[in-house]
């Protein structure tokens, strides 16, 4: 790791405390409720794989839901100056199967790879009206598109998913690429052509465990009140963007575990060591999770956490 990256905050000054549940030494976390990922297909277990940025794959037996897939990850210059073309081969390699793809909002780092993943797997693309417009732009048929205004239960096989209206946090005092999409954007798009639209926090109810996905640096307290989850996937940028972000999210949702997301720069290749977002203070984020009464599960890129469901 280059020393200059440590100086400007792109690299940690000490090794990150990853929890890797494929390895036996990590299985004692949270009173033994984590189980070995190698045994996941032979047990009644739920696996959650981290894709980087705000992306996750949630799987249990024959059901797979994908949240905010963004594997293409072009470099910073290409992201700012070129049209963004999904890397179909990389998507197929790392996500060979999906039943539904849930999108939290329509910025490029949350939605770009969603339509291609749906084309490859036959999954539905589910999200806001802006998400629907992106799906149409990418050539998905209406039969694979489902738009929601939030606060409705949507069946996903034996599971239920529900989008809770939310807010996009301010980054350096402003919301990037604000607004909505009422018509299909150009495809492939430039970064600025993908406006966020309605932001949704997704609650995935598997019948035994509930997973909440907060993919942005803000949320609406009233939408989270009365909701509960076992596992919270929480955007690390929020710690700098909103006062009491971590404490409020955990107080409202009462998760047992928190998996941090959106802590890397998004512009390093998927299979390379990620750079940290300067100013996020990932270690401080983990400390705040513990102080709020939950167990943090910092997961490496493409790493998996596995949970018992009985």
Image (tube, rainbow, N blue to C red):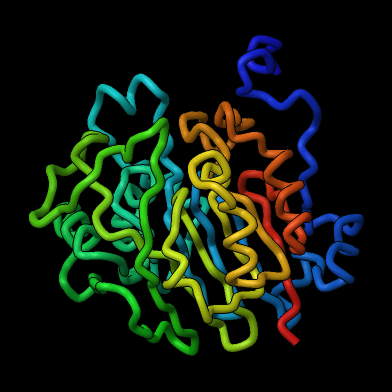
Residue 26: image quadrant is: bottom right
Residue extending farthest to the left is 183
Q: Position of residue 291 (x, y in %)?
A: 77, 55
Q: In this view, does 176 lie above or below 243?
A: above
- Horizontal side of 5 relative to 31 (left or right) equals left
Quadrant location of the N terminus in the rendered image: top right
Q: Is residue 151 above or below residue 250?
A: below
In this rendering, the count of numbered labels is: 0
Quadrant location of the C terminus in the rendered image: bottom right
- Horizontal side of 24 relative to 144 (left or right) equals right
Q: Where is residue 277 in the image (x, y as percent from the top left)?
A: 55, 31
- Horizontal side of 10 relative to 101 (left or right) equals right
Q: Position of residue 17 (x, y in %)?
A: 80, 42
* Closer to us: 244 or 66: 244
Residue 72: image quadrant is: top left
Q: Residue at x 57, y 40 (%)?
A: 263
Residue extending farthest to the front is 243
Q: Is residue 5 above or below residue 214?
A: above
Q: Is residue 11 above or below residue 289?
A: above
* Closer to us: 290 or 244: 244
Q: Residue at x 47, y 48 (%)?
A: 217
Q: Residue at x 35, y 50 (%)?
A: 113
Q: Residue at x 61, y 58 (%)?
A: 49
Q: Position of residue 42 (x, y in %)?
A: 74, 79
């Amino acid at each position: 790791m280059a020393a200059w990256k440590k100086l400007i905050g792109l690299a940690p000054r000490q090794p990150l405390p990853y929890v890797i549940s494929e390895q036996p030494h990590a299985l004692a976390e949270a009173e033994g409720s984590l189980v070995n990922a190698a045994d996941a297909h032979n047990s009644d277990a739920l696996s959650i794989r981290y894709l980087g940025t705000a992306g996750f794959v949630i799987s249990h037996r024959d059901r797979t839901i994908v949240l905010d897939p963004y594997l293409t990850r072009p470099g910073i210059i290409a992201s700012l100056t070129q049209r963004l073309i999904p890397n179909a081969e990389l998507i197929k390699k790392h996500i060979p199967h999906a039943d539904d793809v849930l999108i939290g909002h329509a910025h490029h780092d949350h939605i770009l790879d969603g339509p291609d993943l749906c084309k490859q797997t036959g999954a539905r693309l589910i999200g806001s009206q802006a998400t629907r417009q992106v799906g149409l732009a990418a050539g998905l048929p209406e039969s694979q598109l489902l738009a929601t205004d939030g606060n409705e239960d949507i069946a996903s096989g034996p599971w239920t998913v529900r989008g809770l209206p939310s807010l996009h946090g301010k980054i350096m005092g402003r919301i990037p690429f604000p607004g909505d999409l009422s018509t299909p954007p150009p495809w492939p798009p430039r970064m600025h052509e993908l406006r966020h639209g309605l932001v949704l926090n997704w609650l995935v109810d598997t019948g035994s465990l509930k997973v909440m996905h907060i993919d942005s640096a803000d949320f609406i307290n009233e939408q989270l009140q009365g909701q509960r989850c076992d596992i919270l996937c929480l955007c690390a940028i929020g710690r700098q963007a909103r006062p009491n972000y971590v404490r409020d999210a955990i107080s409202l949702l009462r998760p047992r575990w928190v998996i941090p997301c959106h802590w890397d720069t998004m512009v390093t290749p998927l299979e390379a060591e990620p750079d940290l977002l300067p100013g996020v203070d990932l270690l401080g984020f983990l400390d705040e999770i513990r102080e709020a009464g939950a167990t943090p599960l910092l997961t490496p890129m493409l790493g998996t956490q596995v949970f018992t469901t009985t």
